[in-house]
Image (spheres, rainbow, N blue to C red):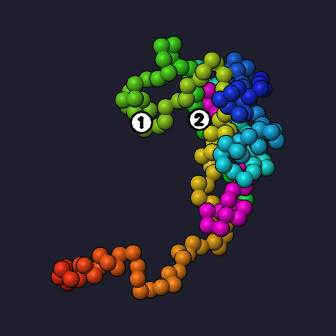
Amino acid sequence: MEKTGSPSSVPWSVLVAVENIPDTGLHIAIDAPAATRAKLAELAALRELPQLSAVFDLTRQGAEVHVAGQVSARVSQACVVTLEPVESDIQEAVDLKFAPAPAGGTELEPKSARKRSLGGDEPPEPLVGGTLDLGALAIEFLILGIDPYPRKAGAQFAPPKVADAGEHPFAALESLKKNLGGGQS
């Protein structure tokens, strides 16, 4: 396993060369450093990301690699109703296959062939340069697990009360409709 500095496109990169995965498999546990969590919190519009870790089991299946594991995180977001902090735990299961990308392009097979040959299963993800980036994989599953509309327990949205029940923006249209005889149903 090789840990690298963060490439410009990925805030957290933990590279594993496929050739370094033994036949018996490889178990890897990773924890994001504080600086990485701060950068990810900013990118994901979180108040903070106090914890982000992942556990992966990698097994080779011929030229393919099966990755199974779990991404765990603790996130703090703003409630969509009250704007108060909302803390939540994220547990996302990972179960993916990776296969070498063909030399001529990024598509593994034509889409129609994938559907027929895999019986509706997801096609394998492409292996790029013979390596897996477990940090990028953990980020992807973290983002998938974040609640897009976090709500504090018991928070209810109540529309503002209208103090004046008389005149409203469509009152003129309502009176015009009645005058033209269209108010009868």
Residue 143: image location, x then y, percent: 63, 45
Q: Secondary structure at mark 1?
A: loop
Residue 147: image location, x then y, percent: 61, 55
Quick one: which residue is furthest to the left in this view?
A: 181
**Res. 170 in view:** yes
Q: Secondary structure at mark 2?
A: strand
Write down the quadrant of residue 127 in the picture: top right
Residue beneath the point at 65% across and 67% down: 82
- In the image, taking residue 151 as reference, residue 5 lies left or right, namely right
Residue tagged 2? 96
Q: Which residues are magenta?
A: 64-86
Q: CA distance from mark 2 to mark 1?
A: 16 Å
Tell me: residue 12, above or below residue 107: below
The reply to whether discs 2 and 1 touch (Cβ–Cβ < 8 Å) is no
Residue beneath the point at 51% across and 13% down: 103
Which three-letter amino acid code belongs to the residue tagged 1?
A: Gly
Most common secondary structure along the magenta stretch: strand
Residue tagged 1? 119
